[in-house]
Amino acid sequence: MVADQAAHARDTEEPVEEIYYRKGDIDFCFLLNRRHHNLRVFDYRVGNYQQKRDFFDRIARTEGLRKVFTVVEKQDSKSWRSVGFSREGAIPGYFRTADAYIMSRVYTDDGEPIQGGAPKLVAPTAHSKEKAPAKPRGMTSEVVSDVRRLQSVASSLSESSMYAPFRRGTFHPDLGLLAKMGKKEYWVGAETDSSFGHAKIDMLTPPDKDVDVSVLAFCVRALLDELLKLETASVFSLCAVDSPLSNQVYAELGFKVTARLTDHVTRDEEFIGAQLWHRRLANTPTPRLPSFI
């Protein structure tokens, strides 16, 4: 880490570390995800893009990162693109009335930025075909909002589910649903953002058999109903491209792929691409999807 430039950092070697940096006209926060070898940037001021890029390049080399990415509005995406970041897709309505664009910079094993921008991720996509999932016979479920319980569950299941926090402050879902079928448990969770009216969904116990798809589809659907009660306008989820059953769950619930992210997560030290699935919950007007999707 660029220790002399970090204004604040936790002294622990946690999988995810939140770091603040402020100097002159530069003011941002970033999540250093050591498990997935990436950096999620929250930029609070426009301008100084080349200086920021050079700062992140140094961190990438020092920490052995594969990727740096940020989520910005359309007008800011062009400035990031001008200093070597690539646009990998969008999150419609992320800022409630405006789309967010995911801007990324991918590095080689030697810590050098890949010339020409992030390699385009090509991945098969399950066709979206919304249908109401029936409750599986013998299944019981409960909504969970206890912070300590959700933190414990996320910590124990994060590696197997490739869970990656997307927001600042709290590195676990703040709303969850637990379902039980016999002795097997299924967990789904949501990171909510009341300011912008969106939530990120995670299947903390992803499906590994066909029979799991219907169970998890019902669980996610039930969680969406809870999010509607919280006036959540839209939801999205990041799903590994090599997990066809997980992608099928979102397709069956009417989600659509709006971004494809190169080398975004890791499994057994192998870099895996991710698809971003998005769905609107509330019938409020939002901008039209970008033409490149």
Image (tube, rainbow, N blue to C red):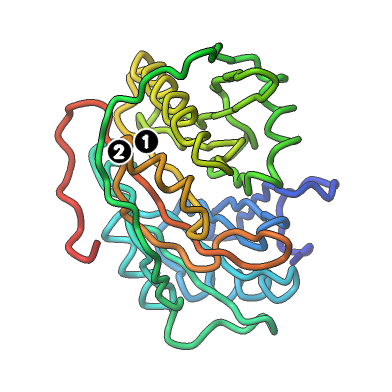
Comparing 114 with 204, the one in front is 204
Label drawn at residue 144: none
- Image spot of residue 228 (x, y percent): 34, 19
Measuring 51% from the left and 51% from the top, which residue is drawn there? 42
Q: How many marks?
A: 2
In the image, taking residue 255 as reference, residue 102 lies left or right, namely right
**CB atoms at circles 2 and 1 under 8 Å apart?**
yes
Q: Quadrant of the N terminus?
A: bottom right
Residue at position x 72%, y 57% in the image: 34
Report x, y in % for residue 40. 56, 55
Is residue 139 depicted above or below 186 in this figure?
A: above
Q: Nearer the viewer, residue 283 or 268?
A: 268
Give the residue displayed 41% in from the left and 64% down from the top. Answer: 103
Mark 1 closeness class: few <14, some 14–19, many ≥20 residues within 10 Å: many
Q: Position of residue 32 (x, y in %)?
A: 67, 55
What residue is disc 2 on?
Answer: 279
Name the amino acid type tagged 2: Arg
Residue 65, horizontal then vertical, whole percent: 67, 69
In terms of secondary structure, where does tag 2 sit?
A: strand
Instruction: Please state which amino acid type lies under the numbered disc 1.
Output: Val
Callout 2: 10 Å neighbours few (<14), some, many (20+)? many
Is residue 283 shown left or right of residue 273?
A: left
| Residue assigned mark 1 | 235
| Quadrant occupied by the C terminus | bottom left
